Image (tube, grey):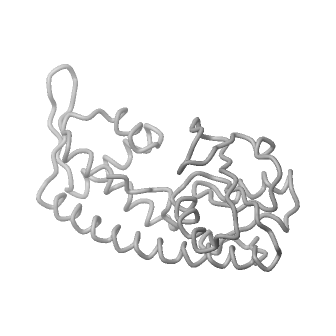
Amino acid sequence: MDYSVHTMNTEREREDALTLEILDVIEKQNNVSQRHMARHLGIALGLANSYLKRCIRKGLIKVSQAPANRYLYYLTPTGFAEKSRLTAQYLRYSLSFYHKAGESCREVYRFCEQKGWRQLVFCGLSDLAEIATVRKSEYPILNIIGYCDATTEQRQFLGLPVWRSLAEAGVHDACLLTDLVDPRVSYGHLTNIMDRERILVPSILGLEFSNL
């Protein structure tokens, strides 16, 4: 299960999401290495080690040494209970995020209609980009040219092209910021190559740059 750590808005939410990921990984594979866990979570090895130790201190995980200097990890009864609690919490958060993100995308699309902007590029592959794509179907006059994300090797997303550089996108009216990893930095990059007025910032991102 992908718990979408990068959609979490607060530090506490990100911590809970990482904890849930760790508990989920260990429940499925008790001989997982910390290096493998770090790669799976998409975080630094030191951070994975820190979270794992925190789970052990809290009594969520127990550890035993195996041959060849390896370790086996097990969920404790407390760990299983915490995993259930965090899973329910995540599902509630996901539904709330989906609803808020959908409404913020509608605000953007109404603004585009008022401005007469039709051709859009989404900047950042993410859950928000997917939600924005789904919501666009309610506004058939608008057209998504494709997606731009300098950090991905993907060449297609939801059936549309993905570019590493906005210059590859061709003619478009505006860019919709859909980066959930570091939207503030992405916004700064966009201001260096296009008019700020044409950078659309959904309210779900919680940035002060919105021009809606």
Figure check: 17 above or below 208: above
* Residue found at the far top of this picture: 68
Residue appearing at x 30%, y 49% in the figure: 22
User: Can you tell which quarter of the image residue 188 is in?
Assistant: bottom right
User: Can you tell which quarter of the image residue 72 is in?
Assistant: top left
- Image coordinates of residue 105 in percent, x first then y, are 62, 72
Residue appearing at x 16%, y 51% in the figure: 75
Image-based side of 14 in relation to 143, left or right: left
- Image coordinates of residue 89 in percent, x first then y, are 32, 71
Residue appearing at x 20%, y 44% in the figure: 28
Residue appearing at x 31%, y 47% in the figure: 53
Residue placed most toward the observer, 137 or 28? 137
Figure check: 43 above or below 194: above
Figure check: 85 above or below 188: below
Image-based side of 64 in relation to 2, left or right: left
Image-based side of 159 in relation to 26, left or right: right
* Residue found at the far left of this picture: 77
User: Can you tell which quarter of the image residue 164 is in?
Assistant: top right
* Residue found at the far front of this picture: 140
Residue placed most toward the observer, 145 or 16? 145
Q: Quadrant of the C terminus?
A: bottom right
- Image coordinates of residue 132 in percent, x first then y, are 58, 65
